[in-house]
C-alpha cells in the first residue's frame, strides 16, 4: 500500500495473486450450473463444449504475443480479437465465459496471476456486451458498434483498476496500448465473425 495525498493506493494484483485458480474454478462451476439450469433454452452439451473451445482460443490469442508494460506490471496482447469474435458469433452467454475465463486463464498461464480476477471482470463484461449488441443484427455496422462498446468497456475497465492501484497518471499511460488492443479486436473480430456467419450459418444451431 502507498498513500498519495489523501488517496490510499493498493496493488490488487499482489493481493489477488494466490486466488486466480480458485476464482476461475468457482466461476466455471457457476457457469456450468447456469447453462444446465437453462438447458431448455440452450443445448447444454454443445454450449459448454463451444465455451471451452473458444475460451481456449482466447487464452492462446492472449499469450501468443505479449508486450510487457513495466509501469503497471501488466502486458499488451491480442486476445481481444478472439473475445470479440466469440461474442459476435455466439452471443453474450458464450461471450462472457470465453472473454472472462479465457483471458484470465491467459494471465495465469502467462505469468500474471494477480491480474486474472481483474481480467475476468473486465473481459467478461466486454464479451457480454459485445455479444448482447451483436445479437441485434449481423450487419457490419452493428458488429462494429458492438466492438466499439466492448472495447470502450475494456479500456475504461483497466483504466479504473489501474488508477486505483497505481494512480491516474500511470494508468493513463496504458490507455494507448489498450486502445490499440480494442481497435485490433474490432477489426479482426468483425471480419472473422462476418466470414463465419456467412459461410457457416449452421454453427449458430449448436447453441
Image (cartoon, grey):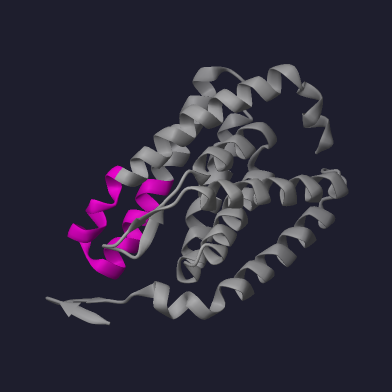
Please indicate, yes or no, whether residue 1 appears anywhere in the rendered image. Answer: yes
Main secondary-structure element of the magenta-colored stretch: helix
**Is residue 197 rendered to the left or right of residue 37?**
left
Q: Residue at x 50, y 42 (%)?
A: 80
- Residue 100, quarter of the rendered image: bottom right
Image x and y of residue 120, in percent: 54, 59
* In this view, 6 is above or below 65: below
Nearest the viewer among 45 and 40 is 45
- Residue 62, position as x, y percentages in the image: 52, 50
* Magenta segment: 154-176
Quadrant location, the N terminus: bottom left
| Residue 46, percent from left and from top | 84, 44
Q: Taking the image as drawn, is residue 93 in sight?
A: no
Magenta residue check for 158 = yes
Residue 117 among magenta residues: no
Q: Residue at x 36, y 57 (%)?
A: 68
Question: Is residue 86 left or right of 184 when viewed as pictured?
Answer: right
Residue 95 occupies which quadrant of the picture? top right
Quarter containing the C terminus: top right
Residue 19 appears at what percent x and percent y?
55, 77
Q: Is residue 89 above or below residue 170?
A: above
Residue at horizontal 40 percent and vertical 33 percent from the top: 183
Amino acid at each position: 500500500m502507498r498513500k498519495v495525498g489523501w488517496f490510499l493506493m493498493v496493488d490488487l494484483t499482489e493481493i489477488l495473486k494466490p486466488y486466480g485458480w480458485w476464482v476461475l474454478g468457482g466461476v466455471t462451476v457457476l457457469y456450468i450450473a447456469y447453462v444446465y439450469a437453462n438447458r431448455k433454452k440452450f443445448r447444454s452439451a454443445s454450449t459448454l463444449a463451444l465455451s471451452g473451445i473458444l475460451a481456449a482460443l482466447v487464452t492462446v490469442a492472449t499469450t501468443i504475443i505479449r508486450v510487457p508494460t513495466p509501469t503497471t506490471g501488466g502486458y499488451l496482447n491480442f486476445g481481444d480479437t478472439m473475445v470479440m469474435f466469440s461474442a459476435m458469433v455466439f452471443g453474450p452467454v458464450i461471450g462472457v465465459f470465453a472473454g472472462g475465463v479465457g483471458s484470465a486463464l491467459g494471465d495465469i498461464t502467462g505469468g500474471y496471476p494477480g491480474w486474472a480476477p481483474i481480467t475476468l471482470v473486465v473481459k467478461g463484461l466486454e464479451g457480454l456486451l459485445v455479444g448482447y449488441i451483436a445479437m441485434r443484427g449481423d450487419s457490419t455496422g452493428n458488429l462494429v458498434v458492438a466492438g466499439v462498446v466492448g472495447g470502450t468497456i475494456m479500456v475504461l475497465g483497466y483504466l479504473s483498476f489501474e488508477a486505483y492501484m497505481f494512480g491516474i497518471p500511470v494508468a493513463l499511460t496504458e490507455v494507448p496500448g489498450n486502445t490499440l488492443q480494442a481497435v485490433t479486436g474490432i477489426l479482426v473480430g468483425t471480419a472473422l465473425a462476418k466470414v463465419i456467419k456467412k459461410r457457416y450459418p449452421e454453427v449458430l444451431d449448436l447453441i
